[in-house]
Image (cartoon, rainbow, N blue to C red):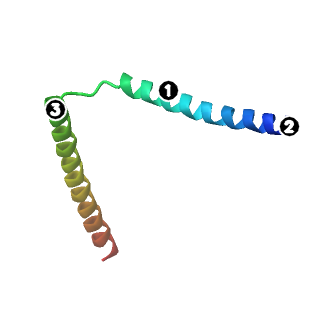
Amino acid sequence: MQEKEKSAGKTAKVKEPKKSWFQGLKAEFNKIVWTDRDTLMKQSVVVIVITVILGVIISVMDAGILECINLLIK
């Protein structure tokens, strides 16, 4: 009889932390402040432009270094 009561108490304790964890997660998500659409678009455009510029710079440097190595080898 005591074993059944102990096992029943354990299952109740197991479910409680999960519920508490989900409540905590929901509370944290409610604290998130999302940026407005205009700011998000401006920042996205800046990231894309900088990425393209750096890609071009790296490509030009790579081609230049490759040409220099080819000249040294010949």
- In the image as oriented, which residue stretches furthest toward the bottom? 74
- In the image as oriented, which residue stretches furthest toward the right? 2
Q: Amino acid under label 2? A: Met
Residue at left offset 73%, top offset 36% = 8
Q: Circle 2 — which element?
A: loop
- Residue under label 3, please give it: 37
- In the image as oriented, which residue stretches furthest toward the front? 1
Residue 39 locus on image (x, y percent): 17, 29
Side (left or right) of 68 relative to 38: right
Side (left or right) of 12 relative to 34: right
Q: Amino acid under label 3? A: Arg
Q: Disc 3 versus disc 2: distance between alpha carbons?
A: 62 Å
Work out whether mark 1 precedes mark 2 in sequence or the reverse, and give the earlier one: 2
Side (left or right) of 28 relative to 10: left
Q: Circle 1 — which element?
A: helix
Side (left or right) of 62 relative to 16: left
- Residue under label 2, please give it: 1
- Residue under label 1, please give it: 24
Give the quarter of the image for residue 69.
Answer: bottom left
Residue 74 locus on image (x, y percent): 30, 77
Q: Is residue 24 above or below residue 46?
A: above
Q: Circle 3 — which element?
A: helix
Which one is nearer the viewer's eye here, 43 or 4?
4
Work out whether mark 3 precedes mark 2 in sequence or the reverse, and give the earlier one: 2
